[in-house]
Amino acid sequence: MKKLMIAVGVSVLLSACAGGMGMKDGMSGSNMSNPMVGGAPMYANKDIVDNAVNSKDHTTLVAAVKAAGLVDTLKSPGPFTVFAPTNEAFAALPAGTVDTLLKPENKATLTKVLTYHVVPGRLDGPALMSMINAGGGRAMLKTASGGTLTATMSGGHVMVTDAKGGTAMVTIANVYQSNGVIHVVDKVLLPG
């Protein structure tokens, strides 16, 4: 069960790397074939890993997924929803954080951070909006790591708040993958 949850988390993260259209601009994403993320087309018939490795904006995330040993897991059927931080999001962490997380002795911590960005199931823009509306303006999302993310709306964008109170904005939504959907975010979300 733990291995499945880790796989789900990683798949969601890699899916997020694949990108899509912003929720502010339209929630469906179905009118975009092969959206561009990080300068590369994202193909709905490929899995999260196969798409993410081509995004120039997600090289740090891909390196982290490899260091955590989650690649094979993310190629599983899912479905997963991944909130994928960009390279800039990782660079905004305190100096040395990424290098420290990538060390073999910190694999468990890295895995927890990565799987915190993954929510089991396929939650595209319309599904998230429905959950936010049903929750009176907020949706509580259970992550693959066992933590909780809170999704809200602000200025036409979906905002995701982590356990420490940090907030990330979905900058590219609804990047559909064969095993889930990715939403690119501008901050790294941190578990409690």
Image (cartoon, rainbow, N blue to C red):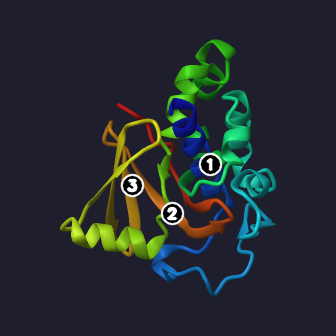
Residue appearing at x 45%, y 59% in the figure: 169
Q: Is residue 186 above or below residue 24?
A: above
Q: Earlier in the sequence, mark 2 or mark 3?
A: 2
How far separated are the C-alphas under marks 2 and 3?
16 Å
C-beta proximity under 8 Å, tags 1 and 2: no
Q: Position of residue 101 (x, y in %)?
A: 60, 23
Question: 158 or 118, which lies in front?
Answer: 118
Q: Position of residue 24 (x, y in %)?
A: 46, 78
Circle on res. 11: 1
Q: Position of residue 61 (x, y in %)?
A: 67, 42
Q: Earlier in the sequence, mark 1 or mark 2?
A: 1
Q: Is residue 107 above or below residue 191?
A: above
Residue appearing at x 25%, y 73% in the figure: 133
Q: Earlier in the sequence, mark 1 or mark 3?
A: 1
Residue appearing at x 72%, y 42% in the figure: 62
Name the residue beneath numbered marker 2.
122
Question: 160 or 1, which lies in front?
Answer: 1
Element carrying mark 3: strand
Question: 175 or 158, which lies in front?
Answer: 175
Circle on res. 160: 3
Three-letter amino acid code of the residue under disc 1: Ser
